[in-house]
Amino acid sequence: MKRIMIVVLLIAAVALALPAAGARQTEAAQGVTPDSVLVGNSAATSGAFAAVGVPFNGGIQAYFLMVNEAGGVAGRTIEWVHYDDEFDGAQGLTYAQRLVEDDRIFAFVGHFGTPTVATTQEYLNTIGIPRVYYATGLRSLFHLEATGGARASFPVQPIYDAEGEVMVARAVSDFGARRIGVIYPNADDGMGLLAGIELRSGLLNVPIVAAQVAPDATDMSSAAQTIIAADVDVVLVAANQVPAEVAIKALAAAGSTAPVITSYVNAAPTFVEGVREALGSFDVYANAWLQVVDDEGNPTPALNEYVEAVSRVDPALAGNPFAQAGWIAASAFVQGLERVGTDPLTWEAFIDAMEEAPIEIPLGGTVDFADGRRVGTQAMSLLKAVYDDEPGWIVDRPLEAIDDILE
């Protein structure tokens, strides 16, 4: 109880010291000088998740270096400070408070990891400080019409709810599904994906048959039998990594032949290796929100620019998807700065700029923040799992926004 009271008092005290969420500002915000703008984040750069956090931060650093060497934005270079929170929510909150209150950053760029994002969300919404890109699909970030401090939040990569909608769009448009099966764990990923599936299936008047499983279940045969008995046309495995692998194996063992679509989180060769035996029973697909090659398999100009820039920081980052995510985070932030231009750089001006038109995602599509929309990108491609000499994925459907998928 004492810890909760301390956090509440800290939030109240900082809220008095900083501009309230939504308040009109006429002078530049904290972290802004005529020559620079200071931004920051905390991320796991040691411990088990360092393999994600280190390249993610490397991608951010590379993009800011490229921008600064070209003269910055509106005469300002971008300065960046970051801390290692070791993927720990309590440390993440401590560093968020330090970044806001001591370092006095203008914005968070690349707010990293489910534990830190979840723990800091109330605090940062109360402050109303901009946050551009979350390295998580946490469903509490999903808002169809954000208000107050949540309007300062800009998720770019897909949020579970939004991806669930895309899954249904693909099932109906690309596979002609008239009845859809869903296997989902009782966890944030499963519940978020299910919410989006239910939303879009309701709009399209397509019935679903859903089977819930425990996130740590090793036997999902009962759920598989439920789905098969419903005679569905497509199965959506609304789960990440291990639960998704268990579900797909259970479907194959139970004799299912319906194609499976799963989350972009699973679109890695290691996942294909895990479900290899199921590929003889049905096709497995996964969403993807980046496209780094053209239709002929050649690198896109955006990928070439990325590789050239990150190789100056660390050549090992050239093919790293986490570094690509950091690059995208920095790019989205810079686009907001460029739109504000030489006008006073306030939080409100930045938020308005981010909403005025879709943000281009290098290596991907776009994300639209208009009218408080905070759902991440819904422009996704569809990959098909293959196992020839080695496991992998091939592009089955191009990168498309949800409205284009449903045309």
Image (cartoon, rainbow, N blue to C red):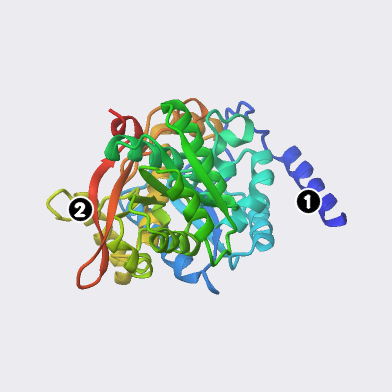
* Furthest residue in direction right, as rendered: 2
Q: Amino acid at mark 2?
A: Val
* Furthest residue in direction left, as rendered: 296
Is 92 rendered above or below residue 26?
A: below
Is 238 rendered above or below residue 379?
A: below
Is 147 rendered above or below residue 31?
A: above
Quarter location, residue 200: top left
Q: Quadrant of the C terminus?
A: top left
In depth, the one of 331 and 196 nearer the eye is 196
Secondary-structure class at tag 1: helix
| Residue 75 visible, this angle | no
Secondary-structure class at tag 2: loop
Q: Which residue is mark 2?
A: 293
| Residue 279 visible, this angle | yes
Give the numbered dot on residue 7. 1
Q: Work out how far the residue at label 2 is from the one at label 1, CA to CA, in angstroms.
A: 47 Å
Residue 402, image x and y in percent? 35, 34
Q: Quadrant of the N terminus?
A: bottom right
Residue 24, image x and y in percent? 61, 26
Residue 80, image x and y in percent? 49, 56
